[in-house]
Image: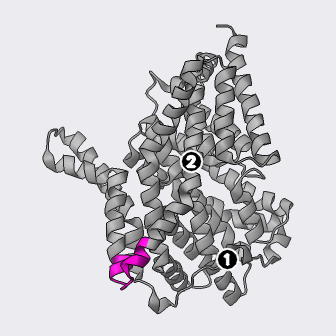
Amino acid sequence: MSIIDNLIPLIIVALAVVLLLIFIMKLNINTFISLIIVSFLVALALGMPLDKIVESIEGGMGGTLGSIALIFGFGAILGKLVADAGGAQRIAITLINRFGEKFIQWAVVIASFIIGIALFFEVGLVLLIPIIYQIARQLKISILYLGIPMAAALSVTHGFLPPHPGPTVIAQQFDANIGMVLIYGLIIAIPSVIIAGPLFTLLAKKLVPGAFEKTGSIASLGEVKAFKIEETPGFGISVFTSLFPVILMAIATIINLLQDIWDISGNLFFDIIQLIGEPTTALLISIILAIYTMGIVRKIPMKDIAKSTEESIRAIGMMLLIIGGGGVFKQVLIDGGVGDAVANLFSNSSMSPLLLAWIIAAILRIALGSATVSALTTVGLVIPLIEGTDVNLALMVLATGAGSLIASHVNDAGFWMFKEYFGLTMKETFSTWTLLESIISVVGLGFVLLLSLFV
């Protein structure tokens, strides 16, 4: 095939992205519906047989949600149980009290990181901002001084660490070991948070000093339940419950590595450990633990626990459909031959698949706004490129995740949430939030490439 033949599918994708932006931003059509409409149009434009289009769309939806719907749902329930019992508030307040005013930023970073593993980004933001407001008011410091480290920690966990939807979905699509994604993700996440959080705050204060004088507004959060500290679960049990799925997955990964080293197969003990370490199983066990530690022990009626679980699922319903829509778009690109066109264009390229995945994800993130949708679409484009290579699949997940975080701007809900909660102007939001996300993306890529030299 000529270069022109390979470029035509990519031009179709570019036009599809533009059309998607018009649907979502200009015409205000629901993101999920926009994704499905555009997927149909792309399938037609790519010349897919008419009798295969619906099959491809249904396959993309089922293939994506089939692998992550349980994980996504269980994660939402776990986070809601911890939050509604006051566990998340206990984690934040305890760390802040122990670190003191001098190291208050680091307390916020650690609290946000722990809470961020258990809660989705938007939920963590809504939960932590009132606490940040309270601390800033008591200590007479800038709300943004604490807000940047908080947002950095939440964003890093959202982009790099299972069981968050982005890295979990990408790992499933790449068929990567999710335990290794978690371990490598933690190695990358910790320095990324430090650089994009407390260290970046120093730069941001010089770039937009006026932003650090803003008081912000939390009126849009509505009613946020606040607890007296004595009403909340203990710090240790709150942390243990929040991190329990991560603990189970990490243990299973370590034991599986030992199994490979010792060359043991067909062992019932190892099979049981592997089952427990699967994200779905780990989260289900964690929910049972949370019902006990955050509910029964706290003498919270079962009907209230049931209400929390129902509300958590209701809140993520549309998000699940949007992720499924991203999977549909990805599948249409694969079945329509776009991935093959990309593979042909880069067939003689010496560029690292890790760098290529990051670049594609970054371009799509800037165009689409959604980190999860851009990551999913990237998977569809790069899968043909990694066939026959020895690239580390766990690092491919993290490189794609890093690219999908870059340059959040006006087409991303996170941009507007950060702007409104902290009372910033557009310029101040670009100079803080957009730059923060870009730093996480670039630093994350740097550590992925560094790790690739050793694993």
Circles 2 and 1 in contact, beta carbons < 8 Å: no
Whether the magenta-drawn stretch holds residue 135 is answered as no
Q: How is the image coloured?
A: one colour
> How far, Cα to Cα, is label 2 from label 1?
25 Å
Residue drawn where x is 23% and y is 41% of the image:
261
Q: Position of residue 425 (x, y in %)?
A: 85, 65
Q: Quadrant of the N terminus?
A: top right
Looking at the rendered structure, the secondary structure element under dot 2 is helix
Magenta stretch: give its range: 293-306
Looking at the rendered structure, the secondary structure element under dot 1 is loop
State whether residue 362 is above or below residue 202: above
Residue drawn where x is 64% and y is 37% of the image:
36
Residue type highlighted by circle 2: Leu
Q: Position of residue 335 (x, y in %)?
A: 55, 23
> Is residue 352 in sight in this rendering?
no
Residue drawn where x is 74% and y is 41% of the image:
367
Residue at mark 2: 321
- Judged from this view, the residue extending furthest toward the top is 1
Is 244 positioned to the left or the right of 438 in the image? Answer: left
Q: Quadrant of the C terminus?
A: top left
Residue type highlighted by circle 1: Gly
Q: For this rendering, which residue is in front, 455 or 440?
A: 440
Crowdedness near tag 1: few (<14), some (14–19) or many (≥20) residues, C-alpha within 10 Å: few
State whether residue 83 is above or below residue 279: below
Residue at mark 1: 222
State whether residue 228 is above or below residue 24: below
What's the magenta bit mostly, secondary-structure-wise?
helix
